[in-house]
Amino acid sequence: MKIAISGSSGFIGKHLGAFFSRQGDTVVPLKHAYFKMSSDDVLKDALSGCDVVINLAGATINQRWTKVAKRKIMNSRVQTTRRLVSIVNDMPLKPSLFISISAVGIYPSDGIYNESSSQEGSGFLADVCKKWEEEAQKLSTDIRLVIARLGVVLASDGGALPFMLLPFRFFAGGKIASGKQGFSWIHIEDLMSAMQFVITHKELSGIINFVSPQPVTNRVFTEAAAAALHRPAWFVVPKFVFRLLYGEGEVLATEGQKAFPARLQSAGYAFLYPDIRIALQSLVV
């Protein structure tokens, strides 16, 4: 199978590329430089003959949300998706599957939501997800579309987890603000396996939550992290600290969603790491 991946040099892209290569698939990186070109020729050549396109491209949201940063976060997702969809739609021999990444940040910060939930959150992150998904929905109807709404991807070598665990390593760990905010997450091994599952299960299309079946709160995550590292969790980090560091981006730490992977489970996917304690124990090095 030939699989094209945008955002292939990022944390998730590197893991997926290595995973599919180990499976014997041919991985085609859609390099960042390709999207800077005014012509679509190089992208068209790269996409030619691909069976699957995985659209991961997007500037990191883990930064201070200045006006410039917010514009980059939004445009890097919307414009990349728009361009890929336009190219794929015009291809005479189209890929059979287009997987476009989104996030559970589209859901409200209260309640628990699955793929059939119609409620949407408010604020910048939810707006990004909505516009991102709207571009993916413009895909030709003769191509199977999966919109993968990701929770926080946990891995030992990248993403948010190393930064989240750092205070605990220095005996300064603790909950953030009230600790009641939702935390939907997925182990990197489950993310890769679930991607493979979706590719092979051709009956799956539309919105799919890529999250553990056990969403937790920040307080529960804090307790599990402290136990995994054999450290105390005495501290409480006030909300204003994140406001000073990240501006509006504080919501990434002080708010959160609880999402449930109803469609993956109903299709028969068995999670390797459904429990946050077991997941963190496997990742702590």
Image: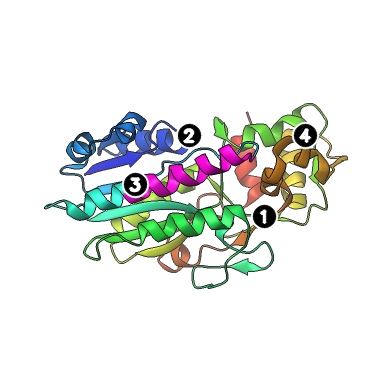
Taking the spot 62% from the left edge, 52% from the top edge, the residue there is 275
Q: Is the residue under label 3 in contact with that under label 2 (CB below 8 Å)?
A: no
Mark 1 and mark 3 lie on one chain; the one further toward the N terminus is: 3
Q: Which residues are magenta?
A: 65-82
Taking the spot 19% from the left edge, 40% from the top edge, the residue there is 44
Amino acid type indicated by mark 4: His
Taking the spot 51% from the left edge, 62% from the top edge, the residue there is 261
Measure the alpha-carbon separation of dots 1 and 2.
21 Å
Mark 2 and mark 4 lie on one chain; the one further toward the N terminus is: 2
Q: Is the residue under label 3 in contact with that under label 1 (CB below 8 Å)?
A: no
Question: What is the secondary structure assignment of the residue under circle 3?
Answer: strand
Q: Nearer the viewer, residue 113 or 195?
A: 113
Measure the alpha-carbon separation of dots 4 and 3.
38 Å
How many marks overall? 4
Which mark, by number, is residue 230? 4
Q: Quadrant of the C terminus?
A: top right
Residue 217 rendering spot, x and y as whole percentages: 72, 55
- Would you name the residue on which mark 3 appears? 54
Which mark, by number, is residue 11? 2
Question: Is residue 91 left or right of 261 when viewed as pictured?
Answer: left
Question: What is the secondary structure assignment of the residue under circle 4?
Answer: loop
User: Would you say residue 242 sits in the magenta stretch?
Assistant: no
Residue 272 rendering spot, x and y as whole percentages: 50, 50
- Nearer mark to the viewer, of 4 and 3: 3
Measure the alpha-carbon separation of dots 2 and 4.
27 Å
Amino acid type indicated by mark 1: Gly
Binning the other alpha carbons within 10 Å of mark 2 as few (below 14), some (14 to 19) or many (20 upward) gives some
Mark 2 and mark 3 lie on one chain; the one further toward the N terminus is: 2
